[in-house]
Image (cartoon, grey):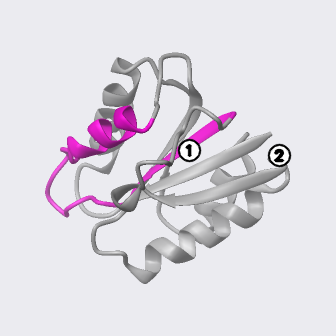
Amino acid sequence: MTGVLIYFDKKNTPQTHIYIDAIKEAAHSRCDDIHILDGYTLADTDRLSMYGYIAVFCADKSFFSSAYDPKILTILKEHGLKGGSKGCVLTLGKGLFSGKFARNVMNGLESCGFIIDYFNILKNTADAVRAGENIG
């Protein structure tokens, strides 16, 4: 199965890339091939419909907020996220309201018809490895 990990991080922090590397290494146990895409820099030719599994990693979370950037849904819809697509949602566990932030992201994606089979709030690299093992 070919999977894709789409991450959203405006600041492009080193911590996000550490988590992405850990997820990618662990995901090879269930996915033949996993592609990593920066959600904010997707090209017009990048289509999500060709992937069997879509992992959405939202690393943009402010300390006091539980709201996610609505551009995330717009970007995913414009690049082929369709009803019936299967995947998971990963968020960072930083600041207050991390659980509510994850729930809001999942509700937004499910409203588009995205089927979520797994979610995780990443607090350290061990969580990222565990999340990677469940991709696919």
The local secondary structure at tag 1 comes to strand
Q: As rendered, which of 88 and 51 lies closer to the eye?
A: 51
Quadrant location, the C terminus: top right
Which amino acid lies under the numbered mark 2 shown in the image of this protein?
Answer: Arg
Image mark for residue 55: 1
Residue 105 locus on image (x, y percent): 33, 37
Q: Are marks 2 and 1 in contact (CB under 8 Å)?
A: no
Image mark for residue 21: none
Q: Is residue 47 on the magenta stretch? A: no
Please say if 7 is above or below 136. Answer: below
Outermost residue to the front: 45
* Residue at mark 2 to residue at mark 1: CA–CA distance: 13 Å
Residue 63 visible? yes
Q: Is residue 80 left or right of residue 125?
A: left
Q: Which residues are magenta?
A: 52-79
Q: As rendered, which of 119 and 11 lies closer to the eye?
A: 11
Residue 15 locus on image (x, y percent): 45, 78
**Residue at x 21% of width, y 47% of height:** 69
Outermost residue to the bottom: 14
Q: Is residue 71 on the magenta stretch? A: yes
Query: Which residue corresponds to mark 2?
Result: 30
